[in-house]
Structures are given as C-alpha cells and as structure tokens.
Image (tube, rainbow, N blue to C red):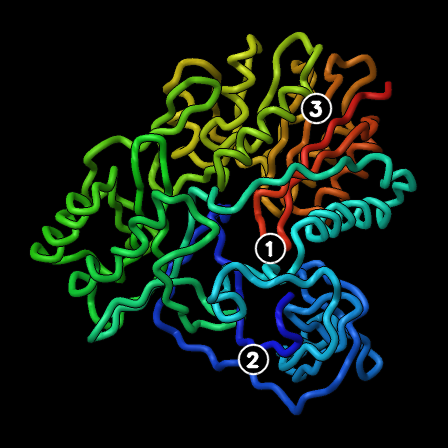
Amino acid sequence: MPPSRSPRSGSPSRRSGSNRKQSTRKGVRHAEPSFGAPVEVTIERLGARGDGIAAWNDGSLFVPFSLPGETVRACPGPKRSDGVAARLEEVLTTAAERVEAPCPLFMSCGGCTMQHFNRTAELAWKRDTVVEALTHRGYDDAERLVAAPVAIPAASRRRASLSYRQLRERFVLGFNARASHQIIPLDHCPLVTPSLNSVLSRLPAALHGWVPVGAQGDLTMTDSDSGLDLVLDLPEAPDMAAYQGLAQIAEDLDLARLSLRINGEVEPLAQRRQPVVHFGGIAVSLPPAAFLQPSREGEQALQKLVLEGLDGIKGPVADLFCGVGTFALAIAAQGHSVSAYDHLALQTGPLRSTGRVSAQQRDLFRQPLLNTELAQFTALVIDPPRAGAKEQCEEMRLLAEGTKLQRIVMVSCNPATFARDCRLLEDAGFALQKITPVDQFIWSAHLEVVALFDRMR
C-alpha cells in the first residue's frame, strides 16, 4: 500500500497506439490550465475517463488518480461540460483498492491514468461501464449479458504514438502530461513490448541533430512481425545531409522501415525489410501509419471471440471497417467467403493483394451498405472506430423479411456508442446474446468488447 499522501499531479492526455488518426502539430502553444485553492472532498464514484467524481458546489468535481471512498484534497480548475476538472493535491484516506504504481513516471506522464487501481478492481469497474451503458439504453438484463473481461497483460503494446520536440541541446521524446503540451521524457515504458523499449531508450540520442531545432510532432512506433516500423513527423522535407543521417539511424537501430509524415503525407525514407503482420496464417504488408490492434495478445483474443461468434454460420460474411484484415483473413482461413470494406485504400489494398478476400474501399459513414447489399451475406462483422456504426446500424432496419442475414458480431472500443448501436440493431430485429469485454488497454479507461447478435425474425 502506498503512503496516503500523493504528490502533485499535472498529468495525462492519453496518446495510444489504438488511435486511427494521427496529427501533426504546428508549434502552436496553448495556455496551461489554472487551478484554485485546495478543497477537501470525498470521492463517490469513477467517471467514464477513470477520474474520481466528488460532489462540489452543487455539481461534480473530477479528480484524477483518486478512487471511490477516498477523502482527498484537490484544487478545482477548468470547467468541463459535465462539471469541473481538478488537480489532486493529497490523498487523506486511501481506498483498499489503491496500489503502488509500477511506473515511477505515473501521475506526470500522460500515458496511463489508472496505475493506482488494483488490477482486479480495474477489470470489474470496466465491466461495470459496459453494464451501465447498456442499462442506460434500456437493457434491463445487462448484468446477465456482460461476461467477465479478458485481461491482456502489460508489456504487450506493439504500437505507441509519442510526442517529440527538438530543442537546441537535446531531442525530447515521451508522452504528454495530462491536459498539457509538456512532454514527459522517458526511455522505458511498462506498457510496450521489449522490442519497442529497446529502441525507445536509444532514439533521442540517435535523432538529435537530424531534426530541425523547434520542430515538434508525433513519432509512431509499431512492432511488426518483421521488425520495427517508425513514422516521424517533420515540418518540411529534410535536406540531403539530414536524409542520409536519418537513413543511417534506420541501419543503426535495425529498423524494418523509417517513414516521414510531412504535411499529413507519409512516405518511406528507408525500408530495409517490408513490415508485415500475420492474420489467419497469412502475411499482410503493413502500410506506414495503418491501423493495427495495439497488442498481439489482444488481437488474438478478439479474433477468437469473433470466430466463436460465427460458429455454425454457413455462407458469405462481410467484414465492415476491416482495416488491414485482422478479422477478414482469420475468417477466410475458416473457409468463409469474405467481403471486406474500409474507408482507407492504404488498408484495403494490401488486404486485396493477399488474394484471400474481396476488399473494397468504401466510407461506411457516408455510404453504408444498403439493405439490398446486406441481404447477400449470412453474417456481418463490424469493428467501427470510437464513433460507432450508427449509419450502418440504421440501414439494418430496412432489411426485408426472410433475408438470409442471421448473425452480427460487433467489436467496439467505446461502451457509449456501442450501447447506442446495440439499441439500433435491436430495433432492426437483432437480439443481443452476449458481450465479452477485452481489456488490452491496461491502466486506462479504454475497453473493447465483442458482442453477438442473432436475427429475431
């Protein structure tokens, strides 16, 4: 049990490898939030982001790194839509679920928000967030529907997006502090794979001097099956000396590929090996900056649940929001005919080149599959981004009686939009049978679920 007094916290705006979009900052500086005098409050519950919530001034005070039942001293700060954000100053009485954080940078680095929470209690709370979201949408049997979470361990994240800034005297690389543009330097992270950590400790010295002074942006690292794949933001194309220096870094660090993102466009600078990933025993060439499940272990757990959800299904399957084929190729390996759809050609192209599935570029938000197209499939797998699949689920209501579409397996990373889409599918005649949470975002409020729906009519 850690001491009851906690240090001041500036902390975390999570930068996760599960993000499907990357950004390039232009050097704009934002004012740091200001906080008032400390107040003493009792934490009643945890919010959706994992912050403790206390009643204060006829509203809610959101205190990071606190747990239900704890009495804390916190400094009120910026207003938010649902209350007031605070900075934790001191934990006066500790909850039994509080543990010592495994990382010395916790509460300053923004990569994690819940290392102070007992892992068993963290999993139970995450399951409860799914139950609550479904209950809010009218599912009175939500407690029965949601299974125990599948827990993915730390040191398994194969993808991480960090922030960097090139100062005159050094290259700073790390995660942002909470709600801040301050970068907390780090040379080791307990979340990521050993391969990523081995390069993380060497990158600042290697990159120093080859990036323009004042430059800042993201550096994304992926531990592919054939080696490390890095994408570095730069404000402009490097000159010949910097180009050669960066290419030498790829050689020195034994990178599979080093790419540059300039004005949003990504181009390989040095490719020593083609980064690949394997789904269903099939190798797929990984495009720079393509979406990938953050851990191999999490990916395997999700694939297993999706395949179990399709058990007994005969006939063609559609994989919507397919990415580079995480589920499509695993389903094809089971003998199904698979049609896959994604809005990014850089993802459907490599998938199509395997020759194992039919892959098509299509924006499913603006152009969801029509009911006449859906009718040709016996099952759907839907894995939307955090915004969910509202437009596609609404189209399901137009399905004709007697259609052969009988099962839907949905993978979601947002309990709120997932619960909304569940209700839309229920209205379209698909009954929710079971939900299994998969926690591959250890020490954060994020969670994925796999849900099974069967057609009622």
- Is 7 or 345 nearer to us in this picture? 7
Residue 411: x %, y % from top left: 64, 34
Observer able to see residue 391:
no
In the image, is 230 to the left or to the right of 410? left
Q: Quadrant of the C terminus?
A: top right
| Disc 3 secondary structure class | helix
| Disc 2 secondary structure class | loop
Residue at the bottom extreme, as displayed? 37
Amino acid on which the number 2 mark rests in the picture: Arg
User: Disc 3 marks which residue?
Assistant: 371
Look at the picture and state if 216 lies above or below 224.
below
| Disc 1 secondary structure class | loop
User: Disc 2 marks which residue?
Assistant: 8
Q: Earlier in the sequence, mark 1 or mark 3?
A: 3
Amino acid on which the number 3 mark rests in the picture: Asn
Query: Which label belongs to residue 444?
Result: 1
Cα gap from disc 2 to disc 1, whole angstroms: 20 Å
Q: Residue 47's quadrant in the figure?
A: bottom right
